[in-house]
Each structure stands twice: as C-alpha cells, then as structure tokens.
Amino acid sequence: MTFYYCYDAHCGWCYGFSKAITEFFNQVKDHFRFEVLSGGMIPPEAARPIKSIAPYIANEYKRVEELSGAKFGTDYLWHIQNAEESDWVPESLTPAVVLCIFKEYVPNQQVAVAADIQKAMFEEGRDLSDGEAYRHLLKKYNIPTEEFYTKLKSEQYAEQAKYEFALCRQLQVTGFPKLLLQVSDTKFYLVAEGFTPATTLYARVENIMKELDPTIPKVQKES
C-alpha cells in the first residue's frame, strides 16, 4: 500500500503540515510506501511577482501559524511585508524539478526532502526559483553538486515534474496538502485534506486498516 502526499513547495498550508506528515511518516514508514507528488499550484505560465499575492499571504500565514504551530521566518516575511521591493516571482516548476532529482538519489527520504525545500523558503527566505537555494541540501543528502545542476537544466526532469502535476489532477487533487492511501489498483482512501494533526492521521489509518482487515495490527504511534 502506498501513501501519496500531494503538496506544493509554495503552499503555506503544506509547510504547516510538514511537522505532522514527517512525524507520521517516521512512525509508519516500515509498513507503507510513500510517494511525494508536486501539484503545480503555480505553473510557470501563471507566475506573477510576489506583490500580486502578498496581501493574501500576509493574512493567511497567521492562520497557518495559529493552527499548526509552524513559524514563518523573518527572511521570508520580509518579501511579504516589502513585496514592492522583492524580486521574487513564485512558480512551482523549479522546486518540483528539484524534488524529482532528489527522489532519484534518496527515494526513501521524499517526505524529508519536501519539508526541507519548504523550510528553505518559509523559514530561511530562499528563492525557490534560484538553483542556489538548494545548494545547502546537496551536502545534507550527499548529492553530487555538478550532477545536480546539470539535471536541474535538463528537460527530462522538467517533464517528470509536469507529469506529477498531471497525476495530481488525475487524482482529483484541487487543493494542498492532500494525503491519499492507495490500497489497490483502483481504490484510494482520503486520509488528509488540508492541515491535519498527526494524531488524526493515525486514527484515520487505523480505521482504514480495520475496514480492510480487522486482523491487521493497529497502526500505533511509538511512545
């Protein structure tokens, strides 16, 4: 059985969900496969300067903090509070390409990579459209620098990222974050839509397992 975590690097609610999904993944990773899919929330053709969405973010990030406990960094918030001076033009393709490359090297660490990509922007204020925003993560995940930057320019990985965008649409994902559990070729369960605490994730998956087979041991959080 496979969990599909549909997220977007520019999604503030996904950033708020990072801690919960990471905790959940670490507890159940020995029993399930995990695949992180980039959703393409801001396709390149729809990219606009940050000032066009800054007023919305200025209100919404506070709700994310209140509900999830996540904190947005001052370097990120500078671009929201000084949007007229910011040179950011957010788009989802570049970080999606980066995720595709990282998945090739560390397929079992996809959830951690997605969280680190979001941390790079929402906490550290790095521009995810700039390849240099990921250099510090190459060392962390032991990815060859020259290979990474060559692949970042490759159309192959751009096509992979666009395929993930299309797959999210096929899965009828219209908002992020979304967590789905595939139990057969045609059957999926919705586990989370929007911010969801880890305790709720455990409870929902236990209910799914009970429905599928009452003899399956409970999915339990380690004490």
Image: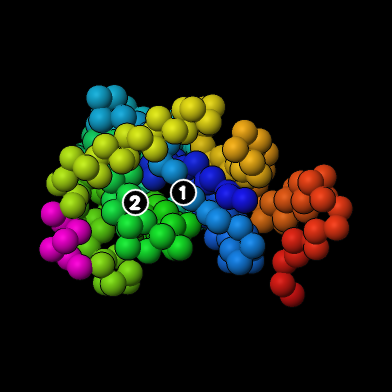
Comparing 185 with 221, the one in front is: 185
Q: Mark 2 points at which residue?
A: 99
Farthest top residue? Answer: 46
Percent of width and height locating residue 53: 36, 30
Percent of width and height locating residue 20: 60, 56
Asked whether residue 12 appears in the rendered view, the answer is no
Colouring of the image: rainbow
- Residue type at mark 1 is Val
Q: Residue at x 44, y 33 (%)?
A: 167
Rendering quarter of residue 64 = top right
For residue 89: magenta?
no
Farthest front residue? Answer: 185
Q: Helix, strand or loop at disc 1?
A: strand
Q: Residue at x 32, y 40 (%)?
A: 161
Q: Give the range drawn in magenta.
A: 144-150
Percent of width and height locating residue 172: 54, 27
Report the number of discs. 2
- Residue type at mark 2 is Leu
Mark 2 and mark 1 residues within 8 Å of each other at the beta carbon: yes
Query: Quarter holding the C terminus?
Result: bottom right
Q: Mark 1 points at which residue?
A: 36
The secondary structure making up most of the magenta span is helix
Q: Is residue 70 above or below residue 141?
A: above
Q: Helix, strand or loop at disc 2?
A: helix
Rendering quarter of residue 46 = top left
Comparing 171 with 93, the one in front is: 171
For residue 149: magenta?
yes
